Amino acid sequence: MKLLKRVILTVTLFTILFFPASVSFNTSAAEESPAPVYYVRFSGTGLNVYGDPSLSGESLAILPDDTYVQILLGPLDFLAKIRVYDTGLEGYVDMRYLKRLDAIVYDYDIYTYEELEEDITKLQERYPELLHVNVTGQSVDGRNLYELVLGNQSAPESILIHAGIHAREHVNPYLVMEQLEQCLIYYDCGYFHEQSYRELFDNVSVHIVPMVNPDGIAISQYGEGALRSPELVETLRACYAYDLSTRRTRSTYENYLARWKANARGVDLNRNLLPGFGVNSKVSQPSYMGYEGTAPFSEPEMLSLGAVTLLCEPSIIINYHSMGEVAYWNTVESRYTAINTEFSNYMLSLVPYQRMRSGTASGSYLDWIYSGENPVCSITFETGNVECPFTLDQYPKIWIQHSLVVQAAAAYAYTH
C-alpha cells in the first residue's frame, strides 16, 4: 500500500515539474518553479486563504484537500505565505494543513518498523548534514534500536523525544518521524517565536528515539507471525494462557495480540525501571501488559533508551503515549517539580490536553528521570481519544495538535 502511494506521488510530482503545460499556471510563477510543491490535507471543508497574515477577515479562497501550493514565506510559527499552483493566487494559510508532495514520511494505514527503517535511510540521504543516525542496540527479537539526532550534535543544550514504548500505541512513532521531517524541510526557512530553525537547532540538539519497542509494535500490528524467533512465539502463547487463566483477558488470541503493550518477552517496558520497580505489582509473570520484568533495566530496549538519556543529558524530555488526550507532568517523588511546573504550563498552552495529578513511582521512565541527578523538565502526552490500537483516522487531529511540539521544546530549552 505504501509503495503504491509513493508511486502515485512520484508520478504526480514528475508531471507538475516537467510538464507544466498540463496545468494552468501563469508564466511569471512558472519561472520560479524550483520551489517545492505542497498539497493541502486534513482540512475538512477546505483550507482558507487570507490576504492578511493575521488570518482574519474574509478569505480569498477555500482550498480543498489535494490542492497544490508553493510556500513563498515561512513558516512563521504555524503561518505561511503560499501561492496556489494552478491559479497563481497568493495569500496566507495555516501551514499545519500543508505537506510536501515529495515527503519521505508518508503512511495513512499503519506505520511499521520496516517503513521506519526505510524512512530513516532516505531522510539521512536527503539531509546528510542535518540528520545523524545512531544504532543504540538491538531489541529482544533482533531489530535495531535507533537514535536520530537533528542539528548540532555538540549544541550546548539537548532535548529528547521518544515514542512507542507501549506496542499498541503505534501511531506515535509516525508522529515523531513526521515532526522530524518537518523540521528538516524548514531548517533554512522556518521560524518559531521569531527564532530561526537554524538558530534553534544549532544551539539545541534534538535526540529522537522514534520506536522504543519495535518487537511489540510488530506483534500488535501483525500478530505472532511478525516475530523472527520461535522461542518468542512460544512466549506469546504462554502469556496468553496465563492471562486467560487469571482472567486478565477474555479476548481471542488475535485480538489479544492486537492489544499487546509489552515487548517480545512479555515485559512492560514502562515498568522496567527505578524507582518504584515492582511496587504494587499485580502480575507475577510475562503478560501482554503490566509485568515489570525480573529486574530494573532487564530489557535491552530500556537499556538502550536509558543510555541515550544519560549520554545526551537532556534538559527537556517529551514522552509520547496513547490514549485520552491527557498529559502527565510530575510524580509525588519528583526532585524537579518546581522547574517542571513552568515548563508543563508552557507546553499545555500549545497542546491543550487535560493535566493529570501527580502519581507515585511505579518503575516508569518518568519516575526514573525525575529521580536522576540531571535536572529535567518533561511531559507525557497521551494522544488520541479512542481505545488503542487505533488507526490513523485519529491522526489528523493529533498532527494539528502536535506539529510544533519539537520547535516549542527546542525554543524553551534555548531560552531557559
Image (cartoon, rainbow, N blue to C red):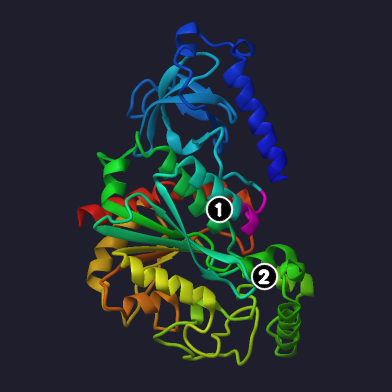
Camera-side mark, 2 or 1 = 1
**Can you give x and y, in whole percent of width and height, for residue 206 in the image?**
37, 55
Q: Which residues are magenta?
A: 109-115
| Mark positioned earlier in the residue sequence (2 or 1) | 1
Asked if residue 112 can be seen in this view, the reply is: no
- What residue do we see at 52% from left, 67% from top? 212
Q: Per the image, is 110 magenta?
A: yes
Name the residue tied to disc 1. Answer: 174
Residue at (32% x, 83% y) in the render:
333
Residue 40 % position (x, y): 54, 31
Vertical relation: 90 (above or below) 331: above
Pick the front one: 236 or 201: 201
The residue where tag 2 is placed is 259
Q: Position of residue 208 (x, y in %)?
A: 44, 58
> Residue 334: x and y, percent?
30, 78
Q: Amino acid at mark 2?
A: Arg
Please check the rendered image and state whether residue 5 is part of the magenta-colored stretch, yes or no.
no
